[in-house]
């Protein structure tokens, strides 16, 4: 059948490129391809010559120098507390000191306006480096203000308020079990969906060894009741399995499996110190894992020595990629983290199949979408999917010559080459700049607030070289 004689169909946007990386079922990369968009959805993907004949777009975006990809999903990021104090924590502190002596005090002293700016800073860094969706870590204190800021920026994300009921400090986060469950109930009833569902609350707990059994059970029940995911941290360092085993006589995943907390709703972050049995149970339960390679590198988790991400992938566990907090992983450019995912286990296992560029990129897109409970909606450029699209500018040294698109995307390029980004069919980044908010004001506010928060925290400046 030919459509040469038909009237072109009016559409909102036609995005065109040198190559279109679809991430569809057969992983087609379309040479001289285009993506047709109506409202917030992709309605067609194909050769530019065909789509130009078929559609009459109101707006054309892209051109011959662009590689067009789906927006990536950051499967684990702290958007408050750390973006706004980025880099203040020294890079030579052990895990426990890093979390309890540095991060908790910094989180504890930020106010609502500071958390809002922090969330916007994180979002803009993600959008400008090609990430259109994220799963937040459940460490927001002023959820209303932060959500307001995210809606203004135009990113897609799932967020949660700080919820734990065991650690007594810092006092600002001290919660009884009832208060912690109340916080989850409130965020799910008040913030389930904002901005056409782009921003919404999940059932998220901090995890580790910070939750009582009743809190775990309630968090799971609320996720089921509100049909959201359940996010938490587990086993980045030995302290989690050791602490769990001491308290409950079982390793964390064994206990959570037995208590029927684990299923395909769960997005578990880190999972570095895992037993083989725990991996079997995770595969059986169908959980997703957020692999955060940059944090592992900076906080010495032992990911390449102890981590079993190749085994998780072999067991069919859905592994996505996260960038975590900016004091344990100073950037939120998921392209740089994806590069590490492709490389770390190649070296650690002296096996080039751990992982090929294509598999690493699937983790950043399709697997992230699944972890976010949005499989079939984001992570690929296919008809019916959300129009979350990234255009990479190849008129840059690291992109030329362009001979193998996936190798270039994962091993050569990073977020600096991202030129244009659409979320829900709307342009949010153009020529590398965020279009939705005043960037200059944000840089200024972030600097002032970062200086104010670190001063208020009373934590020492540990920069080793003298500033003269
Ligand atoms: Zn985290």
Image (cartoon, rainbow, N blue to C red):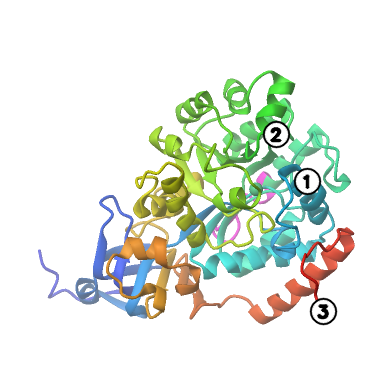
Q: State whether label 2 is within 8 Å of ligand 1.
A: no
Q: State whether label 1 is within 8 Å of ligand 1.
A: no
Q: Is residue 196 magenta?
A: yes
Which is more toward the observer, 144 or 99? 99
Instruction: State which tag comes first along the sequence, 1 or 3.
Output: 1
- For the point 71% across and 20% down, which residue is it? 248
The answer to whether residue 14 of the structure is visible from this angle is no
Please say if the residues under marks 1 and 3 sit with CB atoms less than 8 Å apart: no
Please say if the residues under marks 2 and 3 sit with CB atoms less than 8 Å apart: no
Q: Is residue 189 magenta?
A: yes
* 245 lies left or right of 336: right
Identify whether 130 is placed above or below 7.
above
- Residue 306's label in the rendered image is none
Per the image, the residue denoted by label 2 is 239
The Cα–Cα distance between marks 1 and 3, rounded to whole angstroms, is: 29 Å
Which of the 4 quarters of the picture holds residue 174? Answer: top right
Which is more toward the observer, 62 or 202? 62
- Where disc 1 sits, the SS reads helix
Which of the 4 quarters of the picture holds residue 171? Answer: top right
The answer to whether residue 342 of the structure is visible from this angle is yes
* 210 lies left or right of 346: right
Per the image, the residue denoted by label 1 is 97
Identify whether 430 is placed above or below 337.
below
Image quarter hosting the C terminus: bottom right
Per the image, the residue denoted by label 3 is 468
């Amino acid at each position: 059948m030919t459509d040469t004689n038909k009237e072109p169909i009016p559409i909102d946007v036609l995005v065109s490129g040198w190559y279109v990386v679809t991430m569809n079922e057969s992983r087609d990369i379309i040479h001289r391809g285009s993506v047709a968009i109506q409202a917030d959805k992709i309605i067609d993907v194909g050769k530019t010559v065909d789509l130009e004949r078929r559609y009459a777009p109101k707006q054309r975006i892209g051109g011959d120098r662009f590689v067009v990809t789906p927006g990536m999903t950051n499967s684990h990021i702290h958007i408050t507390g750390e973006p706004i104090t980025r880099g203040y924590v020294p890079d030579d502190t052990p895990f426990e000191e890093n979390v309890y002596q540095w991060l908790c005090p910094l989180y504890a002293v930020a106010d609502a306006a500071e958390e809002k700016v922090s969330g916007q800073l994180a979002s803009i860094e993600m959008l400008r480096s090609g990430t259109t969706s994220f799963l937040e870590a459940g460490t927001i204190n002023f959820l209303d203000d932060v959500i307001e800021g995210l809606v203004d920026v135009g990113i897609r994300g799932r967020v949660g308020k700080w919820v734990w009921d065991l650690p007594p400090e810092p006092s600002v986060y001290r919660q009884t079990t009832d208060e912690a469950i109340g916080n989850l109930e409130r965020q799910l009833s008040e913030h389930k969906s904002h901005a056409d569902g782009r921003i919404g609350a999940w059932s998220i707990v901090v995890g580790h060894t910070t939750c009582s059994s009743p809190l775990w059970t309630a968090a799971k029940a609320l996720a089921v009741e509100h049909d959201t995911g359940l996010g938490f941290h587990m086993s980045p360092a030995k302290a989690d399995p050791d602490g769990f085993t001491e308290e409950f006589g079982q390793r964390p995943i064994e206990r959570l499996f037995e208590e029927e907390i684990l299923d395909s709703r769960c997005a578990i972050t880190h999972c570095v110190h895992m037993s083989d049995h725990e991996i079997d149970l995770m595969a059986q339960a169908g959980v997703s894992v957020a692999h955060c390679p940059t944090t592992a590198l900076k906080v010495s988790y032992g990911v390449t020595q102890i981590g079993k991400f190749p085994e998780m992938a072999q067991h069919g566990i859905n592994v996505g990629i996260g960038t975590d907090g900016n004091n344990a992983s100073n950037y939120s450019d998921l392209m740089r983290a994806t590069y590490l995912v492709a490389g770390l286990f190649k070296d650690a296992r002296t096996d080039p199949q751990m992982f090929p560029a294509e598999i690493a990129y699937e983790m950043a897109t399709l697997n992230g979408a699944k972890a976010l409970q949005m499989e079939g909606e984001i992570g690929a450029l296919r008809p019916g999917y959300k129009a979350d699209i990234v255009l990479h500018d190849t008129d840059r040294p690291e992109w030329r010559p362009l001979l193998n698109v996936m190798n270039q995307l994962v091993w050569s390029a990073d977020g600096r080459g991202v030129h244009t980004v659409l979320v829900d069919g709307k342009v949010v980044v153009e020529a590398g700049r965020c279009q939705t908010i005043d960037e200059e004001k944000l840089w200024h506010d972030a600097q002032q607030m970062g200086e104010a928060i670190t001063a208020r925290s009373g934590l020492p400046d540990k920069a080793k070289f003298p500033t003269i």
